[in-house]
Amino acid sequence: MGREIRVHCPGLVFHVVNRGNNRQAVFLEPDDQKHYLGCLYHYKKKYGFELFAFCLMTNHVHLLIRVCDKSISKIMQSIAVGYSRWYNFKYRSSGHVWQGRFSASVVGDNEYLLTAMQYIEENPIRAGMVRDVGSYPFSSYKLNVRSDDSKLIDRDKNEAFQSLGSSDVERCLAYRQRMASRLQEDSLKEVRKSITGGGGYVSAKFREQMKSLLPIKRKLGRPRKVITT
């Protein structure tokens, strides 16, 4: 099976999923999630990327990131290493905390980005951890609907969120109303397909525009030698 090539282009938005090694828990207590968010904020300031949504589950994380100069690979490597060092020191362990390779799906166009945000912030409900999306303390939902801006979430840079209204009050209300209705199964399948199968979660128009940049599958093994005569 081919391996997806990482694409880098400043301005692209990625839905990133990173899981614990062997799908084991990476957050054992609330302080662990808090420390991960601290790592996220640190590298956000250092590398200048923008964060639109996140959800920290027990054994994996979902992030919605728009890259700038640094690639998504560099960003995630730095965050993973920073958290792993702290985790191994705290729990007197060694070895890998995260699985070898994270998933990074390109997200394009406003409606697709809003759906990706909803998919990410609905995770605790689908997992049966909470009944109300606002009850989960380690997702971006409450930051996206509060009246004042957050240092962690770049709501003002999120064109999809800004398209929901002409003022912060209108936008927050519209987003709350959107989140009140759960994503339908067809939308869930499309987002999951983009995470596991690659190719991005984008419109046909966006795909055509970004055709030269979207990931392609790399064939396993060494390239076949071309013989010329």
Image (cartoon, helix red, strand yellow):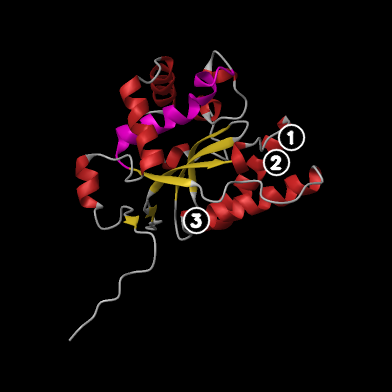
Q: Residue furthest left?
A: 229
Can residue 201 be seen here? The reply is yes
The answer for how far apart the CA atoms under marks 2 and 1 are is: 6 Å
* Residue located at (50% from left, 47% from top): 102
Q: Position of residue 144 (x, y in %)?
A: 49, 29
Q: Hey, which quadrant is residue 113 in on the image?
A: top left
Dot 3 falls on a residue whose secondary structure is: helix
Residue that mark 2 sits on: 35
Q: Is residue 173 left or right of residue 90?
A: left
The residue wearing badge 3 is 73
- Residue at 33% from the left image edge and 44% from the top image edge: 200
Mark 2 and 1 residues: CB-CB less than 8 Å, in contact? yes
Secondary structure mainly formed by the magenta segment: helix
Quadrant of res 127: top right
Disc 3 residue type? Ser
Check the image and name the residue furthest to the bottom.
Answer: 229
Graded by Cα atoms within 10 Å as few (under 14), some (14 to 19) or many (20 or more), the crowding at tag 3 reads some
Q: Nearer the viewer, residue 170 or 176?
A: 176
Disc 2 marks which amino acid?
His
- The magenta stretch is 108-129
- Give the CA distance from mark 3 to mark 1: 26 Å
